[in-house]
Image: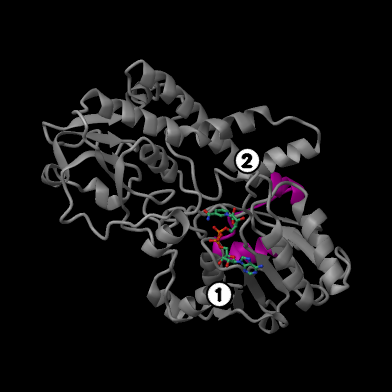
């Protein structure tokens, strides 16, 4: 029994929610929940809390007017978390340098909650993990710090997050949410809480480990499918074919899965398979396909850089140092997220081959690019030109609008347009330009 919490679609009294970690996942969730429940948003990053309080979201997920109007209370003080009875954890789950799960943020968040946890509360984890982390890693920390017993004094839940930053279609109100609880009653309560924000579009998983496994395989499956297409891209590229032409033809078959080739970066698809691989090894199983996929995708930046180099060598004039303009640095289109971007692999390999590289990105934060990647971004494209090569690395929407005239200014005659992301394959380009895509 959870006497402190009674939630139904009709009644959401008695609930006080805290969202722990206000990043790409936590902020939109907290804002949405705050339309229905009293919600406190907690983050250890005090700059983030100050910016959000002033109406600025650096992830560009939430507009200023919404931040200004929300009833969500932003805080960095643990003392503001005492009144809550539902804690939702959305902290990062990165990997170490050796690609092993780094559970430190989860540990810290669990310790924080343990300090304020009261009887009959629910702690829900949304961070992507491998099966067992919620009950076997986080639960014991909560018990140790709070002195309470899980499954008796407080309860665990897991509800994986599926949002896709930058995607305004698959928002949390629109997508099916998987929930799971330590007991059927907890699962029922979570079903009702989350159901309030997405019209009851909830799938209740069998148990917490099943929900944890479901999330991590969603992303591992995507990674492997992309790796397959990347491997095919390397093969057809050597045959002088374009993978995009091959995909256009193959995908006319009704059951062909049309994944796209490319750089798999970010902190989900490129990271989560390592969590699954770690779990498999703990069980003394060798995760062969999962890690093969990771290896192929990790090597893609290098492969692309070497192909660009080869193309540039074909028309190289003596003793000149070629200048390359890279368009796009973030790990995917139309977001400012630079974490684990693989465009940097292309840039570093090209630099090591002696090219002079300029990088432009309309979404990335220049200070972050400088601090984490040691790159000084071009402030804009005006006043720059005569490059030997333009690399379309990220399909940011402004790049889709580049005109023949823009290319003529940016690219020297007979220069190379290397279109990694298939941005301009069907666009009009300067006649003198050479075009290469995967
Ligand atoms: N971003 C996505 O596309 C996405 C999608 C689905 C699932 N996920 C998963 O959701 C989780 C969060 O990802 P994200 O992209 O929102 O990360 P993020 O880095 O954007 O945000 C995490 C926030 O948590 C804060 N934080 C770190 N440790 C904390 C602590 N101990 N207490 C309080 N706050 C703390 C950070 O300051 C940061 O603001 C990860 O497990 C990720 O794999 C992410």
Vertical position of residue 362 compared to residue 51: above or below: above
User: Considering the numbered disc 2 on the image, is that residue within a helix, a strand or a loop?
Assistant: helix
Mark linked to residue 273: 2
Nearest the viewer among 97 and 244 is: 97
**Residue 193, how many percent across, how many down?**
64, 66
Q: Is residue 378 left or right of residue 183?
A: left
Can residue 341 be seen in the rendering of this structure?
A: yes
**Residue 152, how many percent across, how many down?**
89, 67
Q: Answer with mark 1 or mark 2, whichever residue precedes in sequence.
A: 1
Residue at (34%, 57%) from the top-left corner? 376
Residue at (46%, 28%) from the top-left corner? 229
**Residue 323, how many percent across, how many down?**
24, 41
**Residue 202, how many percent across, how many down?**
62, 54
User: Considering the numbered disc 1 on the image, is that residue within a helix, a strand or a loop?
Assistant: loop
The answer for how far apart the CA atoms under marks 1 and 2 are is 32 Å
Q: What residue is pinned by disc 1? A: 34
Q: Residues within 10 Å of mark 1 (few under 14, many from 20)?
A: many
Nearest the viewer among 370 and 167 is: 370
């Amino acid at each position: 029994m959870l006497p402190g919490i009674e939630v139904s679609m009709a009644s959401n009294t008695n609930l006080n929610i805290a969202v722990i970690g206000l990043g790409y996942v936590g902020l939109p969730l907290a804002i949405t929940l705050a339309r229905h429940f009293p919600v406190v948003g907690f983050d250890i990053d005090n700059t983030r809390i100050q910016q959000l309080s002033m109406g600025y979201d650096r992830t560009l997920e939430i507009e200023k007017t919404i931040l200004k109007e929300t009833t969500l209370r932003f805080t960095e003080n643990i003392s503001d978390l005492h009144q809550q009875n539902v804690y939702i954890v959305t902290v990062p789950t990165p990997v170490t340098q050796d690609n092993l799960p780094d559970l430190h943020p989860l540990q810290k968040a669990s310790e924080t909650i343990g300090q304020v946890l009261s009887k009959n509360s629910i702690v829900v984890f949304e961070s992507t993990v491998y099966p067992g982390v919620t009950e076997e890693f986080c639960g014991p920390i909560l018990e140790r710090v709070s002195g309470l017993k899980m499954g008796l004094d407080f309860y665990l839940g897991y509800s994986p997050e599926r949002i896709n930053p930058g995607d305004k279609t698959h928002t949390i109100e629109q997508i099916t949410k998987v929930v799971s609880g330590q007991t059927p009653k907890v699962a029922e309560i979570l079903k009702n809480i989350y159901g309030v924000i997405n019209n009851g579009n909830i799938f209740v998983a069998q148990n917490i480990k099943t929900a944890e496994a479901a999330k991590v395989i969603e992303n591992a499956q995507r990674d492997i499918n992309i790796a397959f297409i990347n491997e095919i891209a390397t093969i057809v590229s050597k045959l002088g074919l374009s993978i995009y032409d091959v995909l256009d033809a193959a995908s006319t078959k009704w059951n062909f899965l049309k994944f796209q080739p490319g750089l798999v970066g970010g902190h989900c698809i490129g990271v989560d398979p390592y969590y699954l691989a770690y779990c498999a090894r703990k069980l003394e199983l060798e995760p062969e396909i999962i890690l093969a996929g990771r290896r192929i995708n990790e090597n893609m930046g290098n492969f692309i850089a070497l192909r660009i180099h080869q193309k540039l060598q074909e028309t190289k004039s003596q003793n000149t140092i070629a200048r390359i303009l890279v368009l796009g640095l973030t790990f995917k289109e139309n977001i400012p997220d630079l974490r684990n971007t693989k465009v940097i692999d292309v840039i570093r390999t090209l630099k090591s081959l002696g090219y002079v590289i300029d990088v432009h990105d309309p979404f990335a934060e220049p200070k972050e690019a400088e601090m984490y990647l040691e790159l000084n971004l071009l402030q804009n494209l005006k006043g720059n030109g005569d490059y030997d090569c333009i690399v379309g690395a990220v399909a940011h929407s402004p790049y889709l609008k580049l005109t023949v005239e823009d290319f003529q200014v940016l690219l020297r005659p007979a220069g190379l347009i290397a279109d990694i992301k298939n941005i301009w394959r069907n666009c009009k380009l300067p006649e003198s330009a050479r075009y290469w895509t995967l």
